[in-house]
């Protein structure tokens, strides 16, 4: 055959190669645009039809159970198709392609015994090419194509091209699956962290059963439902930040950020930048633009501790943000809107500050929408044993070893004034735990940690506890009687006018750890 006779065929092959290269280029662009598989794969099939004439095509991918395949993209089929169509390995030409994990090429589809004509997806008179879609060494689906009948003599070339497209599709499917799995893992981790945070800052972690604390709990539950501004008041160490966290993590804003700032820790010029942010070049050292705490807390909660310490000039700037929800960064002219719930805290008497002109009256009323007053520890002595045990468990978790506290140690704690409130009690427990070699915190370790022993004397004098003292609760009376009786229960029962069975019952119900003598 002369060169002149070969030229037309060569030109046709060159044209076909150019069209397949263009098709591969367009397919790669489509696959790189998005990981939304159904939309992306449908676009790939449309490109294959436009460039190469594959007028009927579909992509199937493995179902999560790994036992069947379902349609992920379909092109060129106008008749209604059952959306629940599935293929198992070896079922139909699709299942055969997956099972053999290599291309299936048929000059006439209807001639193959596996062809399922009843499904109406393909033309039985046309050729058929099935290419396995692989991810690594695993076949995860099938790319099924029908070229026009006129290209039967070049089906192997078309099959080789289909296999290249299937490989590109496989890489995209694998990447999409990895991204979906990572998103699920991140979402699960996020949900676990949220549950952990809610458990950590839930109402159950605020210990106390006195009447005043029950009132505080009820106030927290009510105010947590709404976006009301809250002013938490109480002495240093009473747990104001813990209350703020409980309000946030039990509110509709729990999924938003909880941002906190101690207003007493910064001078006025830095406080403004810290709360409102600043623009680049606003002052010396402002090398970049920076968001303030209000912007960071957008859609969440901002906790402003020691609010009574801010200057009169800054109070006016803060008032505008609280009233209007608008601010400007330091050195900026653009007004920013923020959606922030503010919880403020102070140990100062703001009413006296207002009367003295040190605190703006309008800001006071703007903050004092929902006041919550925390009682000092000395006013809820009955909660000390429970708080102490809670703190022992907390320190036990931190130290990674079991810790216990004796009843004699609790008695020492009950008679201390606690000027530093719960924070002082926590420091005392931690110091005693550090010095405990066997994990038991007894009275000697409490005394070594700096707490003085105070014993309530008899009315007529002496060194023992008056069992008739109205200031003692039932648990204290039983412990005092046991200590005076040398922890002999029968003798302690006589001191209290009880029977041995009655005192044994109280020891059990009052959770008193009996000391072995």
Image: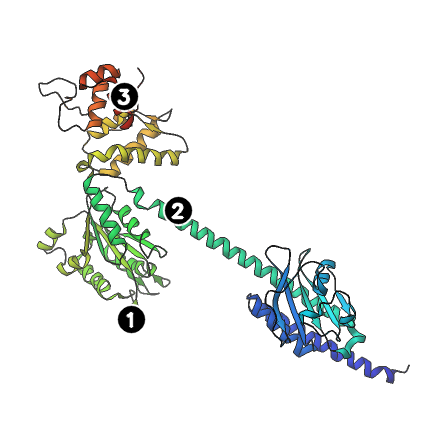
Q: Do the residues bearing badges 1 and 3 touch, measured as CB atoms within 8 Å?
A: no
- Badge 3 crowding class, 10 Å Cα cut-off, few under 14, some 14 to 19, many 20 or more, is some
Q: Mark 1 vs mark 3: give the one in front.
A: 3
Q: Nearer the viewer, mark 3 or mark 2?
A: 3
Question: Helix or strand or loop: what does disc 2 sit on?
Answer: helix
Q: Read off the residue under disc 2.
A: 196
Image quarter of the C terminus: top left
Residue 172: % across, % down: 61, 63
Q: Which residue in the structure is indicated by mark 3?
A: 504
Label 1 vs 2, first from the N-terminus: 2
363 vs 55, nearest the viewer: 55
Sequence-wise first label, 3 or 2: 2
The image quadrant that residue 259 belongs to is bottom left
Residue 333, label in figure: 1
- Which residue is pictured at 72% across the width and 77% down the height? 18
Q: Quadrant of residue 477?
A: top left
Q: Nearer the viewer, mark 1 or mark 2?
A: 2
Among numbered discs 1 and 3, the one appearing first in the sequence: 1
- The answer to whether 390 is drawn above or below residue 145 in the figure is above
Q: As drawn, which residue projects farthest toward the front?
A: 118
| Image position of 281 (left or right of 233) | right
Name the residue at 26% across, 39% down: 423
Q: Residue at x 41, y 49 (%)?
A: 193
> Percent from the top left, x then y, of residue 2?
90, 83
Give left or right: position of 477 versus 440: left
Q: Residue 152 placed where, x, y %?
A: 79, 75
Quadrant position of residue 69: bottom right
Q: Give the CA distance from mark 1 to mark 3.
A: 74 Å
């Amino acid at each position: 055959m002369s060169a002149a006779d070969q030229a037309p065929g060569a030109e046709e092959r060159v044209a076909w190669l150019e069209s397949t290269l263009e098709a591969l280029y367009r397919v790669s662009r489509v696959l790189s645009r998005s990981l939304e598989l159904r939309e992306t794969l449908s676009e790939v099939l449309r490109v294959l039809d436009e460039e190469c004439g594959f007028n009927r095509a579909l992509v199937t991918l493995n179902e999560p159970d790994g036992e069947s395949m379902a349609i992920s993209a379909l092109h060129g089929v106008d008749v209604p198709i059952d959306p629940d169509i599935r293929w198992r390995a070896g079922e139909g030409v699709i299942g055969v392609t997956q099972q053999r994990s290599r291309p299936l090429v048929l000059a006439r589809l209807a001639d193959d015994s596996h062809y399922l004509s009843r499904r109406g997806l393909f033309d039985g008179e046309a050729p058929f090419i099935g290419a396995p879609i692989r991810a690594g060494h695993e076949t995860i689906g099938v790319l099924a194509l029908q070229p026009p009948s006129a290209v039967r003599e070049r089906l192997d070339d078309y099959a080789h091209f289909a296999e290249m497209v299937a490989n590109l599709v496989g890489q995209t499917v694998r990447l999409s699956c990895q991204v979906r799995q990572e998103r699920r893992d991140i979402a699960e981790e996020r949900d676990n962290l949220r549950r952990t945070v809610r458990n950590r800052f839930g109402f159950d972690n605020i210990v106390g059963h006195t009447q005043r604390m029950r009132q505080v709990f009820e106030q927290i539950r009510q105010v947590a439902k709404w976006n009301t501004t809250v002013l938490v008041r109480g002495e240093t160490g009473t747990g104001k930040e813990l209350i703020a966290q409980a309000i946030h993590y039990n509110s509709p804003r729990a999924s938003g950020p909880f941002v906190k700032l101690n207003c007493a820790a910064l001078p006025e010029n830095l406080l403004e930048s810290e709360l409102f942010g600043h623009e680049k070049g606003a002052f010396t050292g402002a090398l970049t633009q920076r968001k303030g705490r209000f912007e960071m807390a957008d859609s969440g909660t901002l906790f402003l501790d020691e609010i009574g310490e801010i200057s009169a000039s800054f109070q006016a700037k803060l008032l505008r943000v609280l009233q209007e929800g608008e601010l400007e960064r330091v050195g900026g002219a653009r007004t920013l809107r923020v959606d922030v719930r503010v919880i403020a805290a102070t140990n100062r008497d703001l009413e006296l500050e207002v009367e003295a002109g040190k605190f703006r009256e309008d800001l006071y009323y703007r903050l004092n929408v929902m006041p919550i007053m925390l009682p000092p520890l000395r006013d809820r002595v009955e909660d000390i044993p429970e708080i102490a045990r809670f703190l022992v468990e907390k320190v036990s978790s931190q130290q990674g070893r079991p810790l216990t506290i004796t009843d004699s140690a609790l008695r020492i704690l009950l008679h201390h004034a606690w000027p530093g409130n719960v924070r002082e009690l926590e420091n005392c427990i931690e110091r005693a735990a550090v010095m405990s070699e066997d994990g038991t915190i007894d009275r000697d370790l409490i005394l070594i940690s700096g707490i003085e022993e105070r014993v309530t004397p008899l009315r007529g004098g002496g060194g023992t506890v008056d069992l008739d003292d109205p200031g003692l609760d039932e648990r204290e009376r039983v412990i005092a009687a046991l200590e005076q009786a040398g922890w002999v229960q029968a003798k302690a029962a006589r001191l209290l006018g009880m029977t041995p069975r009655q005192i044994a019952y109280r020891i059990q119900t009052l959770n008193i750890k009996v000391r072995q003598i």
